[in-house]
Amino acid sequence: MRELELTDDGQDGTVFRDVIMLTLLGFVTIVMLLLPHLNPPGQTEAGTLPPGNLIVSVRWPDRIDADVDLWVQAPGDRPVGYSNLGGRVFNLLRDDLGNNQDLDGVNFEVAYSRGLPAGEYTINLHLYRDRTGSLPVSVVVEVALKNSPEAPARRILTREAKLTRVGEELTVLRFTLDATGELIPATVHALPRPLRNAGT
């Protein structure tokens, strides 16, 4: 009689363990199936795309103590640069001072536009300071365009310029965008147009 009771308890314990294990296995399977869908790869939230429609960036050799300033002007707006960080269309988001207050030694400046008004755009460089005597300073200017917030930025223009003396202001690019925000290739040139002291 006692052996019969032990056998019954053993079977009940085995059934209970099997049910618990199957329940746990089912829960783990459901979690594993749902995990990829909690944060799907390749989808970006609104606001994580880079800002701006027209992105102008300049880069010169890293770790040299030269302060190159980017100046930009949109149609009907005032010039934007280190002494005027924002206008109606453009904002200068980074004013690089060379090695001064620079933790990573990377030399670049960037300006973004809000919208793409039709008309002529001007991009200038100004060599404010060169403490390392690294003249001429070679600068690469890139212009990228985004016609809509969802569109990827595409490079439309690239130029390399050399600044040969402190205080020099150089017009690197002038170009026109049409009413749809597209570049008119025949309008690209570099006729000098000072921006730094141009005012409004």
Image (cartoon, helix red, strand yellow):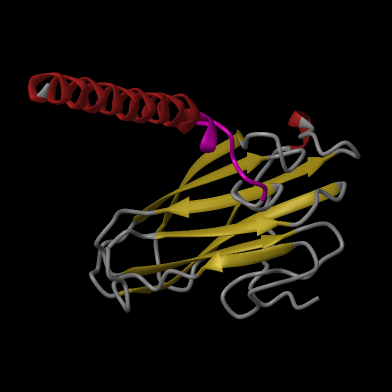
Residue placed at 14% from the left, 19% from the top?
4
Image quarter where the N terminus lies is top left
State whether residue 94 is above or below residue 119: below
Residue 35 sits in quarter: top left
Front residue of 81/180: it is 180
Residue 182: x %, y % from top left: 79, 34
What range of the chain is rendered magenta?
37-46
State whether residue 85 is above or below residue 29: below
Q: Is residue 37 left or right of residue 163?
A: right
Residue 171: x %, y % from top left: 61, 55
State whether residue 194 is above or below residue 40: below
Residue 101: x %, y % from top left: 32, 78
Say whether residue 159 is visible: yes
Front residue of 104/6: it is 6
Residue 45: x %, y % from top left: 62, 45
Residue placed at 32% from the left, 30% from the top?
20
Magenta stretch contains residue 44: yes
Residue placed at 59% from the left, 40% from the top?
44
Q: Is residue 73 left or right of residue 27?
A: right
Magenta stretch contains residue 111: no
Image quarter where the C terminus lies is bottom right
Extreme right residue here? Answer: 179
State how many labels appear.
Answer: 0
